[in-house]
Image (cartoon, helix red, strand yellow):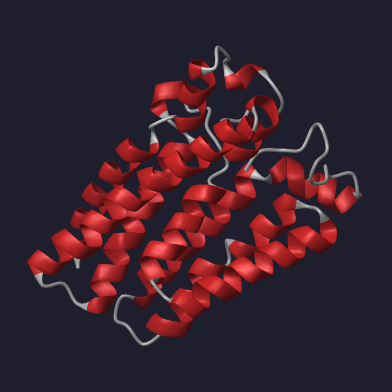
Amino acid sequence: MSAYILTGFVILVIGYAFGCFPTGYLVGKMNGMDIRSTGSGNIGTTNALRSLGAKAGALTFLGDLLKAFIPMLVVKFVYCVRMGCSQDLTYMFTLCAGLGVVLGHNFPVTLKFRGGKGIAVSAAVIVVSTLDPLFIAVGLAIFVVVVAVTRYVSLGSLIVVWYIPVFSVIHYRDSNYFPLLLTISLLFTGLAYIKHKANIIRLLQGTENKLGAKREEDR
């Protein structure tokens, strides 16, 4: 078990390095702006969209997805295949890579630990770790319906991040690694809630910014 934990830690560090790639910040610089100085000051997709337009928002979103997809896919389909990892061990290592990316995105050393909120990269984690079309489709549908009805992107995001621990419970509750898998899974949810602290307070107070509002928070 200790060897697996060490491997998982190394994979997490590699994922963190990928996560530190500041897509939104670089897109902003390409447009002559420090995105941290406008809107909410966040480097995520929503702030890029609001501050720089649809093209910049799309580039930021795609870049954030790619920086999660690349290390996770390599771990899942190259490293784990070559090492002959079991299904649950493959899932754990894939989550470790994704967790590293989320940590890097949220707290990038390249930007003095001032990053995004990790929702786009968490969505990538859900896609790569589960590879379950129905599960992914249901999650996307829930997000879209919640946002469409409430116009709160933050609320949809806070609901969807529970998908990773839910998937772990459904598919890996009988695994010898389940306690560790559940812990890692819940870290994604915990990180999202920590980064959305201000959003949660506004949701409870009924003052959260709605979709399309000028001061809508970033993802």
Q: Is residue 15 left or right of residue 204?
A: left
**As drawn, which residue projects farthest toward the right?**
206
Q: Nearer the viewer, residue 84 or 145?
A: 145
From the viewer's perspective, is residue 27 above or below residue 137? above
Which quarter of the figure is the N terminus placed in?
bottom left
Is residue 67 shown to the viewer in this render? yes
**As drawn, which residue projects farthest toward the front?**
55
| Number of marks in the rendered image | 0
Picture coordinates of residue 173, whole percent (x, y): 41, 84
Picture coordinates of residue 102, whole percent (x, y): 45, 46
**As drawn, which residue projects farthest toward the bottom?**
174
Is residue 112 shown to the viewer in this render? no
Q: Residue at x 83, y 59 (%)?
A: 150
Q: Nearer the viewer, residue 74 or 6?
A: 74
Q: Nearer the viewer, residue 56 or 100?
A: 56
From the viewer's perspective, is residue 85 above or below residue 78? below
**As drawn, which residue projects farthest toward the top?**
32
Q: Nearer the viewer, residue 199 or 214?
A: 214
Q: Is residue 5 left or right of residue 22?
A: left
Quarter-of-image position of residue 177: bottom left
Q: Is residue 146 left or right of residue 1?
A: right
Picture coordinates of residue 108, whole percent (x, y): 43, 31
From the viewer's perspective, is residue 118 above or below residue 73? above
Q: Residue at x 40, y 26 (%)?
A: 109
Picture coordinates of residue 208, whole percent (x, y): 84, 45
Q: Residue at x 36, y 60 (%)?
A: 95
Q: Residue at x 24, y 50 (%)?
A: 11
Which quarter of the figure is the C terminus placed in?
top right
